[in-house]
Amino acid sequence: MSQNNIPMEFIERWKSFYGESQTESIIHNLRQNEPRIIVPNLLKTNIPNLVLQLESNGFKFKKINEFNGLIVTFEPFNIVSTPEYLSGMFSIQALSSLIPPLSLQPSSDSIVADLTASPGIKTSLLAQQMNNRGTIIAIEKSSKRIPALKANLIRMGVLNTIILNLDSVLFPKLDIQVDHILLDAPCSGTGLKLTKNKRLRPRILNDIFRLAKQQEALIEKAWEQLKPNGTLVYSTCSLEPEEGEVQIENFLELHKNEVVLLSIPFDIGSSGSNTNWKPPLNTQLVKTKRIFPKLGYDGFFTAILKKR
Amino acid sequence: MKLFKQLTKDETNQVETTINQILDSDAMTIILKRKMLIKIKGDRNDVYLVLKEDISLFERLSSKLPEKSFSIEHARIKLGFFIHEKFLIGIESLTLLSPLTRKRISLDTKNTQKFIYGKDIVINTISLQKQIEHLEENTTIMVFSDNNIPLGYAKIFSKEKNAWLQNLVDIGIFLRSEKSAF
């Protein structure tokens, strides 16, 4: 049984966590076609310059207030064949993908680890915040995903990154202490819009529990390599609390004396504590963000953990 | 072979000279006073420009994990690669070098599209001729769009009365060969 290609078992559990009305909104928004949204690359350009150049070629845009995003409203030809795209002046992405790297706020002299780096859009946002200085260690487990990662970082003009083909659970073995960690963890992807989600239909609930175990191992390993006062941003594009709120709840319980949750610095989405999870979640989770799918946004969860 | 190795003096000289010639300046010589060149393990002998302090990081990486469990795939700025002991400039160097070059040509919109589709450009207008008239045949130059977007590298060729830019590499490669070229 499914509704609009979404398995009923997912719909039923969303109703139990988020209520009938929010679940209807989730289903409606997951089904929507996503417009093309571009975000300027501040290493190479700014919004007025980018808009001027693309509009002179016939493209039209509608501005989104959040994150300098632009919705492409008219595309006379494929925007990825423009010199502006090929020279890395902008990226194409859902706005929710911007939240984890922008929440990390690395300084230009910091050492940052991006533990699941491909395809590199989030890595390039880290480089933009660091003004292409400092060091990013971009780790990608899958060798098949390395060419896309390299191509994107080169196209976007990222000059401060070392790419390692490595399973992130082995990261502690490298014995590198870092100031910041971005862990956009492998997940069930249940928050992704259906037009780009090849994963939701064949998913079964066991996948969520299996992936939650993987995520738990990745956070634990990453935490070992974080310097005191360092920050780790954890995110997933999943609507399942086991991959978001509950994961962080368990981590807080295990590391009570060494972790502080920081607030997400954007007025967007809702608090991660707003679920009907039983038993009720730690009140600190009010600082995390649960983003439900809407125009420009996939369903998403993000938390910032600071090491004491 | 280790995961990386520093370039020999001869190799370093070759990279430095080639890039200085493309830029028509000694900018690469100045850069190399603060940074260094390495190759990382790979079939194409890719050349990367890294910070001197990166070397100790790479040494540590090599000593901490067995070689089969990981590889360095990219290190800061790739400049190009050696083939048959000759250094060839790569598209990856464009971000670093484009603000530094004095040898350049700007193309109009039509020729920009041709160039990023991998085509050569015939020098058939006074505007194009003027931009390269002071340059010798076989000179490698950087190619820009008329709104100053760096597009790639080309070599000047001429035969009898015809001259053209031979496309060496261009940013269209990100569209044409994302999976095979990087």
Image: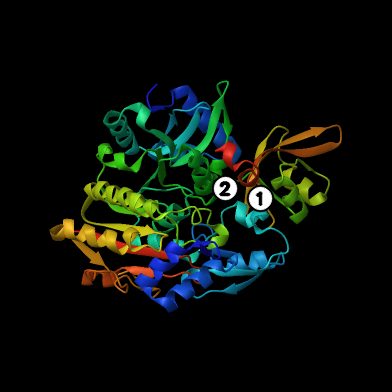
Q: Residue at x 29, y 72 (%)?
A: A273
In the rendered image, the residue lying farthest to the front is A1
Q: Position of residue A236 (x, y in %)?
A: 39, 58
Q: Position of residue B64 (x, y in %)?
A: 27, 31
**Quadrant of the drawing holding the C terminus of chain A:** bottom left
Amino acid type, mark 2: Ser
The answer to whether any part of residue A196 appears in the image is: yes
Amino acid type, mark 1: Phe
Badge 2: residue crowd in 10 Å (few <14, some 14–19, many ≥20): many
- B123 versus A101 height, above or below: above
Give the number of marks: 2
Q: Which residue is mark 2?
A: B98
Q: Quadrant of residue A286?
A: bottom left
- Which of the chains bears the disc numbered 1? B
Q: Position of residue A280 (x, y in %)?
A: 23, 71
Q: Position of residue A289 (x, y in %)?
A: 35, 69
* First-in-chain label (1 vs 2): 2
In the rendered image, the residue lying farthest to the left is A257
Q: Which residue is mark 1?
A: B144
